[in-house]
């Protein structure tokens, strides 16, 4: 059975190799450990090895783990990312705990997060989720609606629009994996030409992180390859 240290080393090696292939510096890609369904002990084990950013898909999971690990007198100091769907009646819990939200797709949710963000925490770092694959069952704004949403979010006082996120259709062919990631990069570049200063592409998971890095990912979201298969 793999140890947390061995798993973390393997993932970092994959990222390093992909960066080398892409001609990019290693520090241009951050690792987000997706801790959905994982317990506090598993998160603490990776954190002790130097992993600082963890992503939660469910609001209750974020609440439970944040409150357990950030309790005084020795808060862990984890950078918490919310990477799941967010309903308007649950925005306050996220605004009060997360450093990042990757899944904005509606102006209403963005406004609530901005209004509920505690002043002492500083701006909430956010990405817009884009449905680049056009799958009807997938969350995310359609590309045609992206510029207007980006303008609205950028105007909110307690949010900092950092970039875009996508969760494309599953694909095993490495070259075909690159297509939706290239599309997200093009959409980011278009927003930059329109005046937005965006530095983040949240894309790539355990099965396709290399393709994502080749197309410009700045943050890869890894769960299975760090923690192993999810519990039943």
Image (spheres, helix red, strand yellow):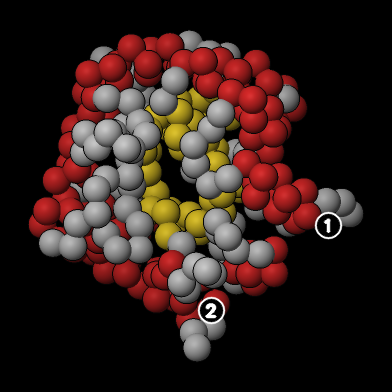
Residue 231: x %, y % from top left: 54, 69
Q: Which image quadrant for residue 69?
A: bottom right
Nearer to me, 76 or 106: 106
Residue 19 seen in render: no
Residue 203 seen in render: yes
Label 1 Cα neighbours within 10 Å, binned few <14 / some 14-19 / many ≥20: few
Q: Which image quadrant for residue 58?
A: top right
Disc 1 from disc 2: Cα separation:
23 Å
Residue 224: x %, y % from top left: 43, 67
Nearer to me, 47 or 134: 134
Residue 7: x %, y % from top left: 46, 76
Q: Residue at x 24, y 48 (%)?
A: 169
Label 2 Cα neighbours within 10 Å, binned few <14 / some 14-19 / many ≥20: some
Circle 2: element type: helix
User: Which numbered disc covers residue 5?
Assistant: 2
Q: Is residue 191 above or below residue 121?
A: above
First reached walking from the N terminus: tag 1 or tag 2: 2
User: Which numbered disc covers residue 74?
Assistant: 1
User: Which numbered disc covers residue 96?
Assistant: none
Q: Residue at x 54, y 38 (%)?
A: 100
Circle 1: element type: loop
Q: Residue at x 59, y 23 (%)?
A: 88
Specify the farthest residue to the left: 175
């Amino acid at each position: 059975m793999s140890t947390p240290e061995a798993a973390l080393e393997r993932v970092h090696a994959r990222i390093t190799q992909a960066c080398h292939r892409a001609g990019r510096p290693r520090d241009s890609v951050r690792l987000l450990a997706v801790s959905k369904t994982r317990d506090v002990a598993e998160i603490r084990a990776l954190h002790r090895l130097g992993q600082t950013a963890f992503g939660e898909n469910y609001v209750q999971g974020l609440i439970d783990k944040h409150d357990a690990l950030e309790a005084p007198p020795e808060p862990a100091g984890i950078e918490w990312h919310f990477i799941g769907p967010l309903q308007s009646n649950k925005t306050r819990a996220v605004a009060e705990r997360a450093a990042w939200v990757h899944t904005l797709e509606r102006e209403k949710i963005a406004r609530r997060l901005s209004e509920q963000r505690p002043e002492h925490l500083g701006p909430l770092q956010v990405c817009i989720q884009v449905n680049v694959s056009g799958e009807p069952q997938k969350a995310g704004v359609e590309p045609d609606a992206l510029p207007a949403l980006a303008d609205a979010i950028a105007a909110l006082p307690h949010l900092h629009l950092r970039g875009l996120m996508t969760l494309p259709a599953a694909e095993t062919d490495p070259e075909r994996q690159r297509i939706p990631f290239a599309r997200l990069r093009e959409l980011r570049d278009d927003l930059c030409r329109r005046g937005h200063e965006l530095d983040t592409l949240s894309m790539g998971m355990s099965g396709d992180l290399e393709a994502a890095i080749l197309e410009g990912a700045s943050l890869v979201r890894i769960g299975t390859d760090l923690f192993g298969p999810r519990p039943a």
